Amino acid sequence: MLALKFSEHLYETGTDEAGRGCLAGPVTAAAVILPEDFQNDLLNDSKQLTEKIREHLRPIIQDHALCYHVKHIEPEVIDEINILNASIKAMQECITQLNPVPHYIIVDGNRFKPVNNIPYSCIVQGDGKYLSIAAASILAKTYRDEYMDRIHEEFPMYNWKKNKGYPTAEHREAIRKYGITKYHRKSFRLLPDQLELQFDILEDVHVTIYNP
């Protein structure tokens, strides 16, 4: 079973992100403060859980958390500041919205930047070790999946409802065939043989044509 806390501080928040490796869509972060008596045997790293269990746990987390916040950072920001900085920015912005204000932050991974002088620790694979990080991973994943399901309706040819923007063979073949949308991350290597890019605008949507 995962540990409740890393520190001795009363209000410790766990934070995590989802979607760093995707070709399209936002990177999404969540931060969660759980009560001192919180327990749940199902709660684990979101990547270890089925979609059904994640959806089951989401309202439990939201109902029992002292507070939580979820933040999307859009592709244009990712392209401007890079995916690592965008991921950290998303987590930081979640933390600044928490009430009560956390006394300590535990972060999944090995990179973070200070926010409001709150002490923090980075914990590699923390989403499989601490309940608050696991809870944040589930909120980030489920909220981002909802986002991708929604924009799938706008551009169904990329099948984001299934691949969630990750670089599957199907997704890359759709990029090769149709070009890219305003939701794609232009700073990423969208195709293995990506060469010259030509940008056009069609109905306020950026479309890129690949000329191999």
Image: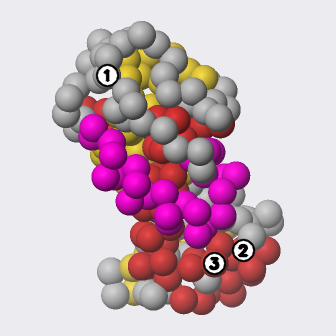
Along the line of sight, which residue is nearer the eye, 153 or 122?
A: 122
Q: CA distance from mark 2 to mark 1?
A: 43 Å
Q: Nearer the viewer, residue 9 or 192?
A: 9
Q: Quadrant of the C terminus?
A: bottom right
- Taking depth in this image into account, of 65 and 150 the one nearest to the observer is 65
Q: Residue at x 50, y 27 (%)?
A: 4
Q: Residue at x 57, y 79 (%)?
A: 161
Separation of residues labelled 1 and 3 (CA atoms):
37 Å
Determine which residue is flagged by label 3: 162
Q: CA distance from mark 2 to mark 3?
A: 13 Å
Report whether residue 85 is seen: no
Membership of 66 in magenta stretch: yes
Q: Residues within 10 Å of mark 1 (few under 14, many from 20)?
A: many
Which-is-in-front pick, marks 1 and 3? 1
- Residue picked out by circle 1: 11
The span shown in magenta is 43-67
Residue 87 is marked as: none
- The quarter of the picture where residue 167 lies is bottom right
Amino acid at circle 3? Lys
Res. 172 mark: 2
- Residue 16: image location, x then y, percent: 50, 39
Q: Nearer the viewer, mark 2 or mark 3?
A: 3
Choose top left, top right, bottom left or bottom right for residue 178. bottom right
Question: Where's residue 152, x and y in %?
Answer: 50, 82
